[in-house]
Image (cartoon, rainbow, N blue to C red):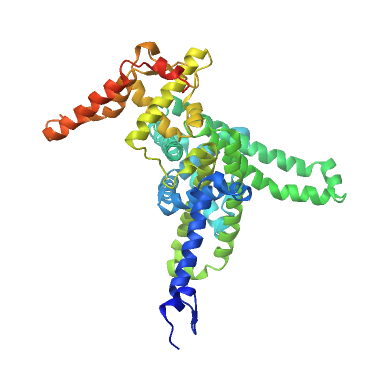
Amino acid sequence: MNYSDDDRLRGAKDPEGTWGPVRHFSTAAVTGAWERLLWGDAAALPPWQRWPRLPLRLVYALARDIGSGMLTLHAMSLVYTTLLSLVPLLAVSFSVLKGFGVHNQMEPMLMQALHPLGEGAREVTQQLIGYVDNTNVRVLGALGLAVLLYSVLSLISKIEQVFNLTWRIERPRSVAERFSRYLSVLLVGPVLLFSALAVSASLRSNAIVQRLVEIEPLGFLLHTGEQLVPFLLITLAFVFVYTFVPNTRVRYGPALAGALVAGLLWVGAGNLFASFMAGSTRYAAIYSSLAIPILFMMWVYFAWLIVLVGANIAFYLQYPEYLASRARDLRLSNRLRERLALELMQLVVRRHFAGTEAATEDELARVLHLPLLEVRDLVRILARGGFLVAAATSPPRLVPAQAPERMLVRDLLHHVRHFGEEAVASPEADAEPAVVAVERRLQRTMDDCLGDMTLKQLALETG
């Protein structure tokens, strides 16, 4: 049967199915609908299509970060650091717990953490406990003890670096602050964890609780709650890590949401990995005695990947501005950077004259609907030009560096446009004279238009 081009365009079918152009059109239509749902104007969408935008954008951002290799690369680097520092970390924790007489609980805790390894969990746990038992702190001496502590602190430092990258933080903590925080984690963390486990165990053995178990449906509810205890402990541990480790203030709501998702992924991935281990006899045949260490490293990798996914969820929920762009980091054009610099200074100067509390970087980011990193860059540029200064408060609040009626709008724009040129040696030396002449004409035109307009006038204008 012969088909004309008109038949093909109308969507006529050949014996093998729908024509290729029709299938392509359907795919394009679905893609277009998806693009409008995610990135289109929200006002043009019906109400039932607006509410899933944030979760869909969140899933897109996580898939983008994993697909680009950001999360996987960080997870692999943490695996390497974990393998180097795991035994020293357990040795320090063992020494702390031994002072409280609960060091015997470390082996069951390790067994629970390595449960996804199946039968290999016992072997890995026994080897780790054996290494810890053979670590004699008194024999190490001062130098050996310093190396031991350095190995442990380097693991926590690496975790902080990765979390700071997740939260787009460029300023690390000072050495003294890091040392004090890391030691508090090493000394207090194990005690709190095992105290929670001890309280849970004592409640299960309590006589009143035992009587309540015999009463239905209280028995079913208590049994279900007991099954949820590991998940709750993991979730609380994630909340602690997400709020304590990054060098920024993390709100508890986003941290809890990220921790809940990470906890669910941890439990689900652990069950899947345990099922995988149950049928992994062929790996033992291929790798022989190396099978258990290789599978152990695989689980450590997946564990860190889950932790980083939860951290990214907490970050995107705290700063949803980063979900408004397809790219991971927003790149401002020169025109948009100038406009946002003016808007930022306008907000700061308005608060100055209104007598209200000065704004923080977080507040400016929410008002301008900008990612925090871009606001920090603008603040840095304006501070270098003598337009802004951060007050000595916690968190730092931004105020005008001098009287707004003495700061000119044209000077601010000139500074923003030329920022960073000091790193280039003589930028105009090799430029074409005709190009330089055009630039100077543009600068004179802008100066003539703005005149002596001050930032006070800009801030108080309403039109």
In the displayed structure, would residue 314 be above or below residue 415?
Answer: below
Q: Is residue 446 visible?
A: yes
In the displayed structure, would residue 87 be above or below residue 188?
Answer: below
Horizontal side, residue 227 vs residue 237: left or right: right
Horizontal side, residue 156 vs residue 264: left or right: left
Residue 94 location, quadrant: top right
Say which of 180 and 70 sits in front: 70
- In the picture, which quadrant includes the N terminus? bottom left
Say which of 48 and 285 sits in front: 48
Residue 382 location, quadrant: top left
Q: Which residue is drawn at the image coordinates 55% and 68% (left, top)? A: 279
Q: Which residue is drawn at the image coordinates 58% and 60% (left, top)? A: 272
In the displayed structure, would residue 320 be above or below residue 37?
Answer: above
Q: Position of residue 329 (x, y in %)?
A: 40, 41
Horizontal side, residue 220 vs residue 409: left or right: right
Q: Position of residue 76 (x, y in %)?
A: 42, 50
Q: Which residue is drawn at the image coordinates 52% and 67% (left, top)? A: 280
Say which of 384 and 301 sits in front: 384
Q: Position of residue 336 (x, y in %)?
A: 37, 34
Residue 187 location, quadrant: top right
